Amino acid sequence: MTDDLSSVLTSLARPKFDPALHDEQEFTPHAARGWTAWDAWSPEVEFCTFVGALQRMLQPQVIVETGVGTGRITQFLCLGEAKYFGFESDEKWRCNPDIDYRPEPTPTVEQMAAAELIILDSGVPYRLDEIALWASAGKHGSVCVIHDAGNGHPQDPQLVHNRVRAAIELTDKPGMFLKNPRGAWIGLHR
């Protein structure tokens, strides 16, 4: 007897590796060997894979993702029945016909308060405001993953990575910084 797995298979994420991947050292000189990215603007492929695996393990009912862009992280998510709010503030990046982008550039208080998984990768200053919004209005027990939190970057306070890291530290939320080349943080709303 063979089970029909077609409904399961169609719900799985289907990452696309087009255009070709590049060594992350091309974009982040201090990166260790073995990290990959599509371009200077995309998150590392391994970070996208991590977020996708985290989403599958947490099985959140409501997901907020900012800085969606062309959907590099989004393509690793298995959304199934989850309610997904995808935001992109820059019109030039809102170009993936497979993504239902929200019309507004950033989440509302209500959307942030409902989300169980929050993925923040929008442009500054949106991301700095989104970090503060999650800290003040996020759902108790929600998990927040923030890209570009710095990892070995120069200590220039104007550098995006350092500004993001400083905003995270102001939240006083428990979490940990990750060691991917561009840096990331995962936190829990308590």
Image: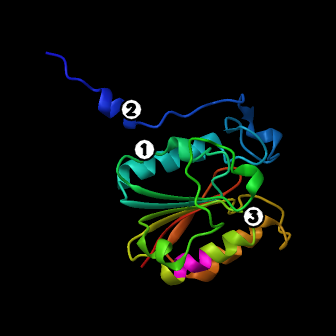
Distance CA(mark 2)–CA(mark 3): 36 Å
Q: Residue at x 71, y 42 (%)?
A: 32
From the viewer's perspective, is residue 175 above or below residue 74? below
Query: In front here: 134 or 68?
Result: 68
The tag earlier along the polypeptide, 1 or 3, is 1
The x and y percentages for residue 83 are 41, 58
- Per the image, the residue denoted by label 1 is 78
Reading the image, the residue beneath label 2 is: 10
In the image, residue 67 lies at what x, y percent? Answer: 66, 58
Q: Residue furthest left?
A: 1
- Do callouts 2 and 3 mark residues in contact (Cβ within 8 Å)? no
Decide whether the magenta segment is chiefly helix, strand or loop: helix
Q: Secondary structure at mark 3?
A: helix
x and y percent of residue 20 in the render?
Answer: 72, 28
Pick whichever of labels 1 and 2 is earlier in the sequence: 2
Label 2, residues with CA under 10 Å away: few <14, some 14-19, many ≥20 = few
Which is closer to the viewer, label 2 or label 3? 2
State the mark number for residue 108. none
Q: Residues within 10 Å of mark 3 (few under 14, many from 20)?
A: many
Q: Is residue 118 above or below residue 73?
A: below
Q: What stretch of residues is rendered in magenta?
A: 131-135
Who comes first in sequence, dot 2 or dot 3? Answer: 2
Residue at 62% from the left image edge and 73% from the top image edge = 130
Q: Nearer the viewer, mark 1 or mark 3?
A: 1
Left or right, 179 with respect to 123, comes to left
Kind of residue indicated by mark 3 = His
SS class, disc 2: helix
Are the two marked residues, 1 and 2, in contact with CB atoms closer than 8 angstroms? Answer: no
Position above or below: 143 against 190: above
Residue under label 3, please give it: 161
Is residue 84 located in the magenta-colored stretch of the structure? no
